[in-house]
Image: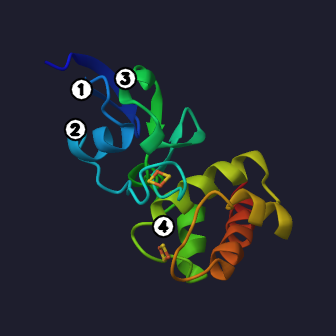
Amino acid sequence: MTAEHEITLTVNGTARRVTVPGRRLLSDCLRHDVGLTGTHVGCEHGVCGCCTVLLDGQPVRSCLTFAVTVDGREITTVEGLAGPEGLSPVQRAFAECHALQCGFCTPGFLCTVTALLRENPAPTDEEVLEGISGNLCRCTGYQNIAKAVHRAAELLAEEA
Ligand code: FES
Ligand code: FES
């Protein structure tokens, strides 16, 4: 029998207590145990970045993370990016620049870009490409996404 572990994750500001087997992936835990299906799974082995969430503010691949290893930590998923005022500047910029692509890659891009702009509020073109290089789109492209990162930087600067 697989041992089960009771863990508490703070997801988008709310403490969630769940019981999971030791090998439960964070991506599966978020989707199936916590019920937040915004986080998507593409490759399931750390390549595509679809499953990116923020762990204590840093982007991580939730498909490479065992849920038990993040007991007690803060997780932000795509559902937690908007605030009481509505969509976040990154989300608004993606909408404005037509960078909201498919439901698989977009949640990961939004989380990655949110963290990128916290660390580097005014990235160059090269830094944007480097910053999103761990998130793959297999069908559309990156031009509007790169534009949206610059636009999000402007919106964040206006808000600051
Ligand atoms: S699903 Fe996690 S990196 Fe592809
Ligand atoms: S993988 Fe989402 S638009 Fe290409």
Please report contact status of discs 1 and 3: CB closer than 8 Å, yes or no: yes
Residue 3 image offset from top left, x and y in percent: 21, 16
Q: Is residue 4 left or right of residue 70?
A: left
Q: Earlier in the sequence, mark 4 or mark 1?
A: 1
Q: Secondary structure at mark 2?
A: helix
Under tag 3, what secondary structure? helix
| Amino acid type of the residue that numbered disc 1 sits on in the rendered structure | Val
Find disc 4 in the rendering and name its residue.
Answer: 106
The verdict on label 4 being within 8 Å of ligand 2 is yes
First in residue order: circle 3 vs circle 4: 3
* Residue 140 x %, y %: 54, 83
**Whole-number angstrom distance, CA of label 3 to CA of label 4:** 26 Å
Residue at which label 1 appears: 20
- Quarter of image, res 137: bottom right
Is disc 1 in contact with disc 2, using a CB cutoff of under 8 Å?
A: yes
The crowding category of the residue bearing disc 4, from other C-alpha atoms within 10 Å (few below 14, some 14 to 19, many at least 20), is: many
Q: Secondary structure at mark 4?
A: helix
Circle 3 is placed at which residue position? 68
Which residue is depicted at the point 45% across and 36% down?
Answer: 75
